[in-house]
Image: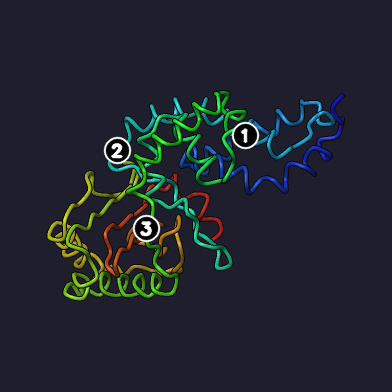
């Protein structure tokens, strides 16, 4: 019989919460959805005979993964009607955190996978589980899980950081990018960007944002030339620099009191992608910690 006290359940569940949130966020790309899944998982934890559970972490990881697989269908339907480019909800790492290998570009690449491929890849390649445990978690044979992870790996290989930028260098580039883009120093900004740079802006139809990515150096520079006139009369208020989903960047308050994150993907010292999140629904979890 399960212990009667919810406090007893929480004593085991709460220390595992950061790991479980990371699994759910990797599966769903949404902090809000991940928190909903964890709430459901805790309710199931309350109902189970916890004395019979030998490995609570493995048990709860299975529960969370399966709940995410169920939720992915409705999540994907929402994204099919999403206004403009979709980006994962940004997560700012603390100064003590090591840069997460579940980077923003990787999260976007995971969107192209089937739910089972996504689960097998994350559990094995990112969280380091063996295929026997992956199989137990997603309810498939180990050989099938190996195939799922292999297919996923082939799809996302190009989106994993091959040469992660050192933290100090990344933050230096982020600071130079902020200064050049906000001060209208377009020549300085151009020097920071790769020829094939892409700008993604996610407003979700709830904050002003370009409806399609700006692709290539000329297109991105035209966009920032337009922004220069805006920044000249309405200065960005810088809140902090840091790493956002594994990428160097910064958080600002923009015209109209809009909270915004900007994350920079860097290769060979040049910015190859700019990810701007402006949708207030995706920044709600961050807003309370910044003001």
Q: Measure the C-alpha gap from mark 3 to mark 1.
A: 27 Å
Q: Exactly how many numbered labels are in the figure? A: 3
Q: Where is residue 275? Give x, y as percent.
A: 33, 54
Q: Position of residue 221 (x, y in %)?
A: 16, 63
Residue 133 falls left or right of residue 243: right
Q: Residues within 10 Å of mark 1 (few under 14, many from 20)?
A: some
Q: Are marks 3 and 1 in contact (CB under 8 Å)?
A: no
Residue 129 drawn above or below residue 41 = below
Q: CA distance from mark 3 to mark 2?
A: 31 Å
Residue 44 left/right relative to 91 = right
Q: Residue at x 50, y 44 (%)?
A: 125
For marks 3 and 2, the one nearer the N-term is: 2
Q: Quadrant of the N terminus?
A: top right
Q: Position of residue 166 (x, y in %)?
A: 42, 70
Q: Alpha-carbon distance for marks 1 and 2?
A: 38 Å
Could you tell whether 102 is left or right of 86 in the image?
right
Q: Between residues 111 and 87, which one lies in front from this camera angle?
A: 111
User: Which of the pair 33/139 is nearer the observer?
Assistant: 139
Q: Which residue is mark 2?
A: 83
Q: Residue at x 38, y 57 (%)?
A: 260
Above or below 162: residue 281: above
Q: Nearer the viewer, mark 3 or mark 2?
A: 3
N-term-proximal mark, 1 vs 2: 2
Q: Is residue 4 above or below residue 101?
A: above
Disc on res. 10: none
Regarding residue 103, the answer to whether it shows in the image is: yes
Q: Nearer the viewer, mark 1 or mark 2?
A: 1
Nearest to N terminus: mark 3 or mark 1: 1
> What numbered label is drawn on residue 162?
3
Q: Residues within 10 Å of mark 2 (few under 14, many from 20)?
A: some
Q: Is residue 291 visible?
A: no
Residue under label 1: 133
């Amino acid at each position: 019989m399960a212990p009667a006290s919810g406090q007893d359940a929480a004593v085991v569940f709460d220390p595992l919460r950061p790991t479980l949130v990371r699994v759910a966020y990797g599966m769903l790309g949404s902090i809000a959805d991940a928190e909903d899944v964890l709430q459901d998982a805790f309710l199931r934890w309350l109902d189970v005979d916890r004395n019979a559970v030998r490995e609570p972490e493995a048990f709860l990881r299975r529960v969370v993964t399966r709940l995410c697989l169920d939720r992915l269908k409705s999540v994907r339907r929402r994204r099919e009607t999403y206004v403009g480019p979709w980006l994962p909800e940004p997560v700012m790492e603390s100064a003590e955190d090591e840069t997460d290998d579940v980077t923003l570009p990787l999260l976007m690449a995971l969107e192209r996978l089937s739910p089972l491929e996504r689960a097998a890849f994350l559990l094995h390649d990112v969280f380091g589980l063996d295929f026997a445990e992956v199989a137990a978690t997603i309810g498939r044979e180990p050989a099938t899980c190996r195939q799922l992870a292999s297919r996923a790996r082939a799809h996302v290989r190009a989106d994993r950081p091959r040469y992660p930028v050192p933290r100090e260098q990344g933050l230096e580039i982020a600071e130079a990018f902020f200064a050049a883009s906000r001060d209208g120093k377009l020549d300085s900004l151009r020097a920071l960007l790769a020829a094939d740079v892409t700008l993604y802006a996610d407003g979700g139809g709830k904050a002003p944002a370009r409806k399609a990515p700006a692709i290539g150096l000329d297109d991105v520079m035209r966009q920032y030339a337009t922004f220069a006139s805006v920044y000249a009369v309405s200065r960005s208020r810088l809140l902090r620099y840091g790493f956002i989903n594994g990428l160097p960047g910064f958080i600002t308050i923009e015209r109209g009191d809009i909270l915004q994150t900007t994350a920079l993907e860097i290769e060979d010292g040049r910015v190859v992608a700019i990810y701007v999140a402006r949708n207030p629904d995706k920044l709600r979890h961050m807003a309370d910690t910044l003001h």
